[in-house]
Image: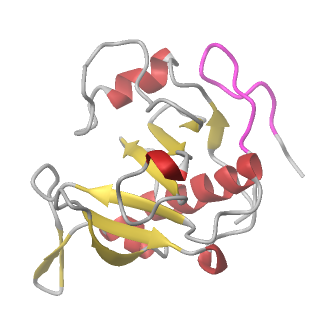
Amino acid sequence: MNEQRWCLSNRADAAARELADRHYNRQKIGTPQFAPTGSCIVFLTDDAKAFWVTSFPQAQWVKHAWAGAWVCSAFRSEGAGRASDLIRQAVAATRSHYGDPPHLGMVTFINENKVQPTMVHGRPVWGWTFRKAGFIEVGRTKGGLLALQLLPADMPEPLQAKPRSMHGTPLFSLVS
């Protein structure tokens, strides 16, 4: 992976907020901030067609079995490219931002009642693009959400996100 599509963003970025407003877990559509409280990093693709939020909640405030893991709180792509590639690049950008991953790696939770599955060999599979990116099914939350996890050994190497201008485009190209 040598190309980084993600640019740094923030929890109140208007372009990312428009995408967040169309994500199924959005609690209050239109409010300026769309990321969970606490430590997080927000990315927006260089074409502003996808956004990603990694949160890093303090373990003592977490009520699921993966306390201490990074959490993909939201990911939505509207034609930004192959989703599994975007996921791996977002994980790489998260590693660049936070450093060494926690021993539980990263988790994401999927509400199967809110998203359509992908049919794989005639059976429905939720989280298919995350699975293609290396995440594995590890259980369910107490509330019934499907949990997928990417362990540190399976993560891509860190790859810094691009800086971002106020207009949604990178400030400059990071050509090597």
| Residue 155 on image: x %, y % | 63, 71
| Residue 27 on image: x %, y % | 24, 27
What residue is rendered at 65% in x and 36% in y? 7
Q: Nearer the viewer, residue 143 or 35?
A: 143
* Residue 10 location, quadrant: top right
Q: Nearer the viewer, residue 163 or 47?
A: 163
* 82 relative to 20 in the view: left or right: right
What residue is rendered at 45% in x and 62% in y? 107
Q: Nearer the viewer, residue 39 or 76?
A: 39
Q: Which residues are magenta?
A: 161-173
What residue is rendered at 50% in x and 41% in y? 53
Q: Residue furthest front?
A: 60
Q: How many marks?
A: 0
What residue is rendered at 71% in x and 29% in y? 170
Q: Is residue 65 above or below residue 91?
A: below
Q: Is residue 164 magenta?
A: yes
Q: Residue furthest bottom?
A: 121
Q: Residue furthest right?
A: 176
Instruction: Give the main secondary structure, helix, strand or loop, of the magenta stretch.
Output: loop
